[in-house]
Image (cartoon, rainbow, N blue to C red):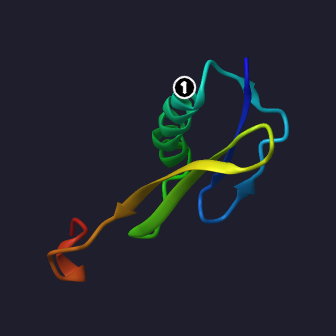
């Protein structure tokens, strides 16, 4: 089985996968990579209204074969004084 490496970046911390995973093929590596994105977002609740979570899949030769982003974008629609209870 081929080995794939899934690197991640949450905008503050970049992690290179140095161990990798033995997976059936690149499609399976894509599925694993995409599944990581929501978990990354849950672990890193942000004070910011704009944050990008990124994963990159590399093959055994180190070539990047897939990348995916999850973008959190929030925007207030009311003035600041209406955002908190009195």
Of residues 49 and 69, which is closer to you in this image? 69
Q: Which quarter of the figure is the C terminus placed in? A: bottom left
Of residues 37 and 86, which is closer to you in this image? 37
Horizontally, residue 83 falls left or right of residue 44, namely left
Residue drawn at x 47%, y 65% is 51
Residue 85 occupies quadrant = bottom left
Of residues 26 and 47, which is closer to you in this image? 26
Q: Which quarter of the figure is the N terminus placed in? A: top right
Horizontally, residue 66 falls left or right of residue 5, namely left
Q: Which residue is mark 1?
A: 28
Residue drawn at x 38%, y 69% is 49
Q: Residues within 10 Å of mark 1 (few under 14, many from 20)?
A: few
Tell me where residue 60 appears, x and y as whole percent. 79, 37
Residue drawn at x 60%, y 25% is 25
* Count of numbered labels shown in the rendering: 1
Relative vertical location of residue 44 with respect to residue 81 in this rendering, above or below: above
The secondary element bearing badge 1 is classed as helix
Relative vertical location of residue 70 with respect to residue 61 in this rendering, above or below: below
Residue drawn at x 52%, y 56% is 53
Relative vertical location of residue 8 with respect to residue 71 in this rendering, above or below: above
Tell me where residue 58 appears, x and y as whole percent. 70, 44
């Amino acid at each position: 089985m081929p080995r794939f490496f899934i690197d991640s970046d949450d905008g503050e911390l970049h992690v290179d996968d140095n161990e990798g995973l033995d997976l059936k093929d690149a499609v399976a590596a894509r599925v694993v990579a995409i599944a990581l994105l929501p978990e990354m977002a849950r672990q890193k609740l942000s004070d910011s209204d704009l944050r990008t979570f990124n994963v990159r899949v590399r093959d055994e030769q180190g070539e990047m074969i897939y990348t995916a982003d999850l973008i959190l974008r929030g925007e207030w629609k009311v003035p600041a004084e209406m955002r908190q209870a009195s």
